[in-house]
């Protein structure tokens, strides 16, 4: 059986004896199917030696060594980013390098998550408080009395403790750890905005209250560290209240409050997976165009050539990627799908750029559906969001989708209103398309896994409007016209006004944005605060 539990152990300075005892307590868990990532947060000789010795004997252990000490929160993010790339890992926790974890620690918490309803994303349990000799001290009873509380109380005090595990599916909905030494409190406040919690009174670990390098000892011994902790607690609680106020406004905006007599059972933040499908060169755009279209006068398979691929990857990196990393909600996967025959060109071109974030990947056309199905494990619904490799979405669009509640019969959300941008001339216009390619297909995961697919390509690119649909009314897309675009020409859009049999316009170029400051503001809403119209590499 492949490991399905991921464990991170950050460590900087640590007593060898305590470090060894912590590792031993993990590797002797009754539930053996886990992967332990030891992140050495600043190399110290004894820590490096012990960690590598255990990794050499146990294939379940990976050691990541960082030369510079950057703090527990940074080390945790390094470890969890490593684990996020393993599709078999579904449950996550982290452990300290000086604590003891009882043999049932992993198995009990994992079973709680497996057996609980799907809305439960965090499980936690009791613990002993120990002195330097590993003996139970009187704090144990008092601290454990405060553990079993409703999640709503978390805004007032931290009561999760030190024995916990959570579902990766919910962890992917939020940013990583921050604000050391209150990183757990901040993280679980954010996590529980997307899931519910469950508790077991069983004591699952021993917490060393005053080991030589523990945070608790540093806080008690240093007024400066204690003041910093208090300042960060204030910030964390203030941010949490602000997020809750924002969520209440969103709920009111999309009418999802208790006034509904029929309970909503469709896609929610908790049960929905957003995957962005980005066709790179797996679709021959020219074959879908009319015979007399200007693009059909060019070479038919130019999108399979090394020159075309190098140019389009440059456009993707300098335009579309900026839109992806600018999303206010990073809980998504993005698959940039390429024609299988061009893998050598793709791999070669990508070597010229920094490594992509773990949730943005180039993938072959033949591997796309398998990757999607693996990513859907644990979810009930799936949004397949379409975006071409030279276009962009507004920074808040994915966040908007997570709070949008479609009708039960709806199969596609269509974005009719957006902008068109000619990057080589910096012309920006308001744009309307009756059935644009900027759409979001809605699937029940069981249906998708069983082969259900919504056909939006017949007739060409306009089939979405024929499906049961809803319209996203605000301007959420940026259609990018540039010299290498073989499918979208801004001048053509101005000159050709297509209409359906009812006489309704299928496309409209509306207002032109002439004020440069306004133009810059709009572009930054899509491409990030550092984007400037003067940037090159888009043509």
Image (spheres, helix red, strand yellow):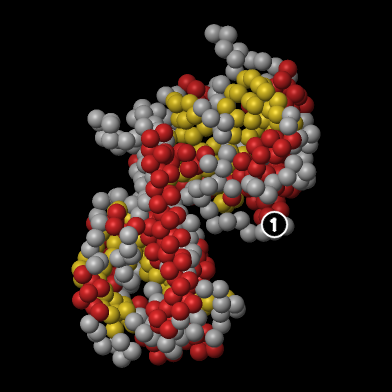
Q: Residue at x 23, y 71 (%)?
A: 144
- Residue under pointer 1: 353
Image point 36% across, 47% down: which residue? 270
**Residue at horizontal 46%, vertical 65%?**
232
Foreground: 339 or 523?
523
Q: Position of residue 451 (x, y in %)?
A: 40, 37
Q: Quadrant of the C terminus?
A: top right
Residue 433 figure quarter: top right
Residue 284 vs residue 532, the one in the foreground: 532
**63 displayed left or right of 147:** right
Q: Is residue 209 visible?
A: yes
Quarter of the image for the N terminus: give it: bottom left
The crowd level at tag 1 (other Cα within 10 Å; few <14, some 14-19, many 20+) is few
On the image, the x and y values in percent for residue 51 come to 48, 83
Q: Position of residue 195 (x, y in %)?
A: 33, 52
Give the left or right position of residue 297, taking residue 204 as reference: right
């Amino acid at each position: 059986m492949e490991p399905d539990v991921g464990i991170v152990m950050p460590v900087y300075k640590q007593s060898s004896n305590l470090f060894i005892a912590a590792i031993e307590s993990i590797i002797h868990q009754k539930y053996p199917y886990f992967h332990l990532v030891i992140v050495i947060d600043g190399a110290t000789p004894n820590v490096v030696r012990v960690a590598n010795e255990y990794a050499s004997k146990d294939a379940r252990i990976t050691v990541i060594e960082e030369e510079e000490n950057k703090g527990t929160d940074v080390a945790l993010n390094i470890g969890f980013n490593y684990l996020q790339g393993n599709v078999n890992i579904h449950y996550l926790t982290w452990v300290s390098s000086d604590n003891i974890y009882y043999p049932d620690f992993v198995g009990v918490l994992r079973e709680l998550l497996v057996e609980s309803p799907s809305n439960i994303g965090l499980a936690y349990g009791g613990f002993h408080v120990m002195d330097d000799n590993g003996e139970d001290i009187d704090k144990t009873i008092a601290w454990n009395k405060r553990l079993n509380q409703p999640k709503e109380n978390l805004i007032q005090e931290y009561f999760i403790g030190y024995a916990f595990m959570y579902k990766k599916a919910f962890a992917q909905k939020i940013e990583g750890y921050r604000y050391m030494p209150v990183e757990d409190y901040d993280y679980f406040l954010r996590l529980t905005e997307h899931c519910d919690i469950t508790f077991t009174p069983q004591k699952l670990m021993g917490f060393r209250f005053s080991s030589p390098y523990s945070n608790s000892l540093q806080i008690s011994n240093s007024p400066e560290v204690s003041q910093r902790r208090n300042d960060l607690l204030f910030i964390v609680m203030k941010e949490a209240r602000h997020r809750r106020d924002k969520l209440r406004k969103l709920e009111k905006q999309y009418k999802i409050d208790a006034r509904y007599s029929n309970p909503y059972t469709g896609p929610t933040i908790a049960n929905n997976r957003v995957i962005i499908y980005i066709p790179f060169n797996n679709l021959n755009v020219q074959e879908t165009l009319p015979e007399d279209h200007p693009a059909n006068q060019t070479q038919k398979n130019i999108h399979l050539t090394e020159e075309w691929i190098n140019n389009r990857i440059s456009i993707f990196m300098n335009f579309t990627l900026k839109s992806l990393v600018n999303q206010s909600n990073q809980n998504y996967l993005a698959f940039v799908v390429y024609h299988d025959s061009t893998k050598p060109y793709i791999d070669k071109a990508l070597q010229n750029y920094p490594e992509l974030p773990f949730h943005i990947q180039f993938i072959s056309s033949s591997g796309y559906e398998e990757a999607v199905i693996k990513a859907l494990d644990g979810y009930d619904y799936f949004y397949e969001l379409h975006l071409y490799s030279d276009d962009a979405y507004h920074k808040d669009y994915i966040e908007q989708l997570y709070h949008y509640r479609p009708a039960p019969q709806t199969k596609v959300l269509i974005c009719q209103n957006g902008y068109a941008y000619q990057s080589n001339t910096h012309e920006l216009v308001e744009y309307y398309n009756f059935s644009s390619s900027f759409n979001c297909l809605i699937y029940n995961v069981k249906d998708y896994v069983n082969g259900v697919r919504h056909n939006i390509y017949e007739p060409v690119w306009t089939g979405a409007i024929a499906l049961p649909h809803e319209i996203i009314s605000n301007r959420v897309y940026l259609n990018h016209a540039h010299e290498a675009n073989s499918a979208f020409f801004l001048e053509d859009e101005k000159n050709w006004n297509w209409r359906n049999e009812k006489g309704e316009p299928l496309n409209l170029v509306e207002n032109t944005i002439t004020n440069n400051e306004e133009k810059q503001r709009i572009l930054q809403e899509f491409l990030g605060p550092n984007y400037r119209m003067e940037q090159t590499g888009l043509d």
